[in-house]
Image (spheres, rainbow, N blue to C red):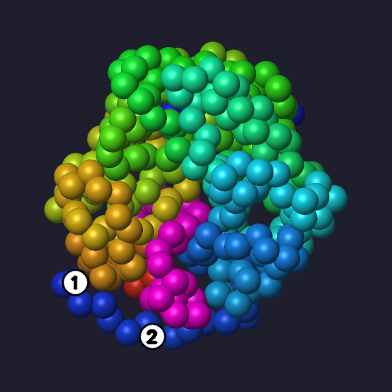
Amino acid sequence: MISQIPETSRGARTRPRATSTRDATVNRMTQDALLIGSHLSTTGGWPALLRRSHAEGGTTFAFFPRSPYGRRSKSLTPDGAVRLGEELRAEHYGPIVAHAPYVYNLCAKDEAKRAFAVSAMAEDLTLLGAFAQGGQPVYLNIHPGSHVGQGAEEGIRLISAGLERVFDQTDADVPVLLETMAGKGTECGRSFEQIAAIIDAVDAGMRGRVGVTLDTCHVFDAGYDLLGDFDGVKRRFDETVGLGRLKAIHANDSQFGLGSRKDRHANIGDGRLGIPFFARLVNDPDLAKLPMILETKELTETTHRDEIALLRGLRDPRG
């Protein structure tokens, strides 16, 4: 049986030194620990993902299930996915947040491009479904798409129709997460209202297979004041989309800031959101329970390891 996302009611910029750099001995049994990791390379196949996650002290991670340009990977086999899923479950990892290639565009003008996005996404979901066979939850995060001049209303219609076509082709137990976008160009998903409209237009019988990833940089750049009105933004999301649909966080600082619509990530504490925001994020009773994925630059070999330790160090030990 396919898992369904339950319907809910809608209603200082100086970067401190991390207090510790935890290693692969992170206590994965601790239920209130942050589920956090970065976007990892799949070079070397499934076993390499786990090694890289251990090296950064992660408890979740993201990866491309195929080339960022859309080509299928020969090293990511279904059998390997089952084995990795079993290992991740044994180590008490949080849900894995795979990222669809950027070339997918469910609302492209060209029907051939839309058809490719549908067929490739269905293949991705089928592959990722092998994780579920190993008992490990996994999501497929997608950029909703760019309407390329057709208008947001048509873009939303095409995206919803595309999702239905994807779900018709696979019954894999892998929810699709729509990522909140910064609003550059003709991106759809630049507002909570657009995200809600996409979900609402999906057939009611399939709607439970759709969730949301909130990208902190994108939301801030789109004009939602996460720094000055954290509770207000959270409340607006709940009233428009529903917190029950929020399944993952992309934890990124912002280079250009509120309303810029630039979509330029900064490393944690080096951008316009800053450390106070991330302290609030990792202590929020709703958001801190979700898998958090870093999509920041690897400035050194230990950048993500240090950022993971930094965010864990911002947690209030009193809960």
Q: Secondary structure at mark 1?
A: loop
Position of 156 with respect to 259 (left or right) is right
Viewer-closest of 218 and 111: 111
Residue at image coords 42%, 53%: 250
Read off the magenta span.
283-310
Amino acid identity at mark 1? Arg
Q: Position of residue 150 (x, y in %)?
A: 34, 17
Viewer-closest of 70 and 269: 70
Q: Say if mark 2 contacts mark 1, CB within 8 Å.
A: no
Q: Position of residue 266 (x, y in %)?
A: 31, 63
The C terminus - image quarter: bottom left
Tag 1 residue: 13
Q: Position of residue 315 (x, y in %)?
A: 38, 70
Residue 284 seen by the camera: yes
Q: Secondary structure at mark 2?
A: loop
Amino acid identity at mark 2? Thr
Position of 180 with respect to 234 (left or right) is right
- From what the image shows, is residue 60 above or below residue 129? below
Tag 2 residue: 19
Residue at image coords 30%, 49%: 263
